Image: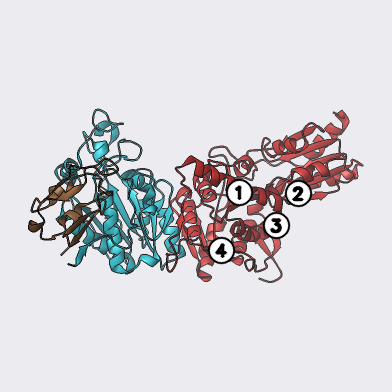
């Protein structure tokens, strides 16, 4: 697939995984990500890979666990309620240090919720939806191209750190079509061989893959080792983008689809002479705390915009403390903010001077 | 003098944590004997459950993977699909397989996954201290059915072999016990047939073992074996349950 | 060379071997192993015909049989 092709986000995710050497996919139908398993059911056989529709997301995520144990590059995708069902398996994979890629095409919640795009799974993704001290690398793409690039890279990062990696999209990103360049991406050359995998103890001692440590001292030691890995992940994988923050008086903070809407509001504000900038976290875990503090140093206000009732805003407050007021504007349940609404908030903040 | 009986190579030479007289130990040995006999130790991957056998990976000399409670058949599916040349078996108790994992086992069987499931039915939750299981018999006392299981309240025990044998993907389903040397020998043949079913790619195989829990049944090991014969084997008849799969 | 060898330290005193020995030549020893169990032992080596019933019933794989 050389050159640009017009692709729907969901299908682009599937093709990106295949281009990155993913040969095992286990999924389950749930709107708004159905095109991914559908696409995989067509493509995986063409590349000699495994596509299997599981009986539930619980089963599917444990099939991912199994394929990862066997050393395969494996992915699953779902949407909010399905990702909730996968949390136990994700915690197990983090505990057993198993690489995999999990894509959440977020929809409005809680409960059955709705099927339109939202960002109300941020806490679940970045603060740990499952039990125990663990972290996933979590990325928030805002274009179909970025969705593709991050999905591809996620397989290398998962293998590199032996840790699940999550791509946090949303229904808008999944359902929209954009031109995208799909470059085949062989695995990084410096990835260590998976000598730990359960492939059959032929000519080597047996491998045991488990997250069970009945001795608390051993479990703590294991946790501290994982924590060291997470520190390394945090130090090496912070990603963000900024736009016109150098002279900004008000800095918008938004990720994914919302960042694009915020950008439209920024442009309108600039037309009216309002000095507005945009800080866009791409890595949601690790959150770019220092970069955000630096990018907003000169600003007197920060306005966080999310498609939720305020989750990433807590990390923004963590980053900035009481150095400046952190405002929030959000739409949720599948509603998305319009540039007009964001602009109104900016004007209110600037006029109030608060 | 010739050694005519000893520890199979696939069974680690370590003490087990199982209670005195618990037949998990016999079942482990039979699996290891079959793995040795079929010469597949170096490509076998076992999956241990959550339950008394949660430490099974310490007791076998082959690669092993810990599954979350009830999910071993799904984990096994992932492993077998990712590496079809592996010989994959799960080792599960009645809480793991017939309670929380009932969905997974039904679908693994109906998909005809080329895996072998060793299902140890001791009619109780052992590791957690003797609670009622889906296979606890009517009237059987446990810590969560203190006046004896009342089917009106807690439902009737699940006959897993009969349930799964209705599924076309189930190529070999048998129920055995280890209450006597003769039954042990029959059980070993069933385990071998199950693994052969997998090796020949004919589909899903499962062997249900009626097993004892002297500690939580409050019996001596010998009494417990007798209880299996007198009570369990009546509700759960031994035998092969594979129906000849209808065409199409 | 004995016909049956008991790994006394692995025995948990469950008595299945004693119960299922067709010739009733096994019993529980007087002494204890380090875990506090009376290990199984053979009383009448002569009458043992190395049938392996005891070893097949042992959950600890603690019995080796020679013929």
Residue, disc 1:
A136
Q: Position of residue B89 (x, y in %)?
A: 36, 58
Sequence-earlier tag: 1 or 2: 1
Sequence-earlier tag: 3 or 1: 1
Vertical placement of B167 versus A189: above or below?
A: above
Tell me the crowding category of disc 2: few under 14, some 14 to 19, or many 20 or more residues within 10 angstroms, Cα based. some
Nearer the observer: mark 3 or 1; the answer is 1
Residues at marks 2 and 4, CA–CA distance in whole angstroms: 29 Å
* Residue sitting nearer the eye, A28 or B60: B60
For the N terminus of chain A, which image quadrant?
bottom right
Residue, disc 3:
A146
Q: Residue at the location (59% across, 49% down)?
A: A104
Residues at marks 4 and 1, CA–CA distance in whole angstroms: 19 Å
Nearer the observer: mark 2 or 3; the answer is 3
- Given contact means CB atoms under 8 Å apart, are the residues at marks 4 and 3 in contact? no
Tag on residue A22?
4
Q: Which chain is cyan?
A: B
In the rendered structure, the colour chosen for chain A is red
Chain ID of residue with mark 2: A
Nearer the observer: mark 2 or 4; the answer is 4
Q: Residue at the location (30% across, 56% down)?
A: B167
Sequence-earlier tag: 4 or 1: 4
Sequence-earlier tag: 2 or 4: 4
Q: Position of residue B93 (x, y in %)?
A: 32, 47
Tell me the crowding category of disc 3: few under 14, some 14 to 19, or many 20 or more residues within 10 angstroms, Cα based. some
Left or right: C44, with A12 as reference point:
left
Q: Helix, strand, or loop for circle 3?
A: helix
Q: Quadrant of residue B184?
A: bottom left
Q: Which chain is brown?
A: C
Q: Helix, strand, or loop for circle 1?
A: loop
Left or right: B133, with A333 as reference point:
left
């Amino acid at each position: 697939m050389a050159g640009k092709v017009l692709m729907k986000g969901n299908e682009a995710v599937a093709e990106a995984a295949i281009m990155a050497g993913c040969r095992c996919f286990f999924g389950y139908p749930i709107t708004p990500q159905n095109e991914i398993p559908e696409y995989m059911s067509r493509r995986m056989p063409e590349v000699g890979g495994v596509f299997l529709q599981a009986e539930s997301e619980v089963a599917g995520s444990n099939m991912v666990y199994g394929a990862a144990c066997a050393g395969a590059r494996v992915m699953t995708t779902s949407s909010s309620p399905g990702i909730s069902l996968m949390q136990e398996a994700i915690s197990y994979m983090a505990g057993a240090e198993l690489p995999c890629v999990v894509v959440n095409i977020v929809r409005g919640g809680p409960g059955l919720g709705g099927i339109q795009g939202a960002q109300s799974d941020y806490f679940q993704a970045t603060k740990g939806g499952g039990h125990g001290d663990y972290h996933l690398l979590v990325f928030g793409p805002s274009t179909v191209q970025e969705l593709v690039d991050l999905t591809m890279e996620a397989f290398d990062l998962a293998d590199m750190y032996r840790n699940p990696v999550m791509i946090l999209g949303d229904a808008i990103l999944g359902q929209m079509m954009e031109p995208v360049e799909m470059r085949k991406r062989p695995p990084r050359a410096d990835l260590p061989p998976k000598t730990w995998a359960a492939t059959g103890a032929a000519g080597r001692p047996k491998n045991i893959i488990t997250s069970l440590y009945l001795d608390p001292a051993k479990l703590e030691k294991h946790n501290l080792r994982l924590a060291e890995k997470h520190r390394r992940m945090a130090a090496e994988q912070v990603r963000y983008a900024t736009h016109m923050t150098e002279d900004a008086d008000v800095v918008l903070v938004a990720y994914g689809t919302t960042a694009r809407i915020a950008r439209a509001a920024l442009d309108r504000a600039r037309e009216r002479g309002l000095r507005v900038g945009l800080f866009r976290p791409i890595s949601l875990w690790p959150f770019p705390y220092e970069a955000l503090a630096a990018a907003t140093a000169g600003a007197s206000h920060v306005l966080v915009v999310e498609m939720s009732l305020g989750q990433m805003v807590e990390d923004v407050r963590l980053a900035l403390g009481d150095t400046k007021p952190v405002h929030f504007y959000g739409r949720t349940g599948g509603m998305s903010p319009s540039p007009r609404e964001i602009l109104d908030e900016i004007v209110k903040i600037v006029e109030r001077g608060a | 003098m010739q050694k005519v009986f000893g520890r199979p190579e696939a069974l680690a030479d370590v003490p087990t944590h199982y209670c005195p007289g618990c037949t998990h130990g016999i079942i482990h040995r039979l699996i290891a004997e079959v793995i040795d006999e079929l010469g597949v130790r170096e490509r076998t991957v076992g999956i241990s459950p959550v339950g008394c056998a949660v430490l099974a990976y310490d007791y076998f000399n082959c690669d092993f993977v810990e599954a979350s409670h009830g999910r071993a058949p799904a984990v096994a599916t992932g492993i077998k699909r990712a590496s079809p040349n592996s010989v994959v078996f799960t080792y599960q108790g009645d809480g793991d397989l017939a309670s929380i994992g009932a969905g997974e086992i039904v679908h693994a069987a109906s998909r005809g996954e080329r895996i072998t499931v060793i299902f140890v039915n001791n009619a109780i939750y052992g590791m957690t201290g003797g609670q009622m299981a889906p296979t606890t018999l009517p009237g059987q006392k446990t810590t969560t059915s203190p006046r004896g299981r009342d089917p009106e309240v807690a439902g009737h025990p699940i006959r897993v072999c009969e349930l799964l044998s209705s599924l076309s993907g189930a190529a070999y389903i048998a129920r055995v016990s280890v209450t006597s040397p003769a039954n042990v020998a029959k059980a070993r043949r069933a385990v071998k047939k199950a693994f052969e079913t997998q090796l020949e790619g004919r589909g899903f195989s499962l062997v249900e073992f009626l097993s004892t829990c002297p500690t939580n049944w409050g019996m001596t090991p010998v009494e417990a074996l007798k209880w299996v014969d007198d009570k369990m084997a009546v509700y759960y008849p031994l035998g092969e349950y594979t129906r000849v799969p209808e065409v199409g | 060379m004995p016909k049956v060898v008991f790994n006394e330290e692995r025995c948990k005193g469950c008595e299945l071997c004693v119960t299922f020995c067709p010739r009733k030549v096994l019993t529980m020893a007087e002494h204890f192993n380090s875990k506090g169990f009376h290990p199984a032992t053979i009383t009448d080596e002569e009458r043992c015909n190395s049938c392996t019933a005891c070893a097949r019933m042992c959950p600890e794989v603690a019995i080796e049989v020679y013929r």
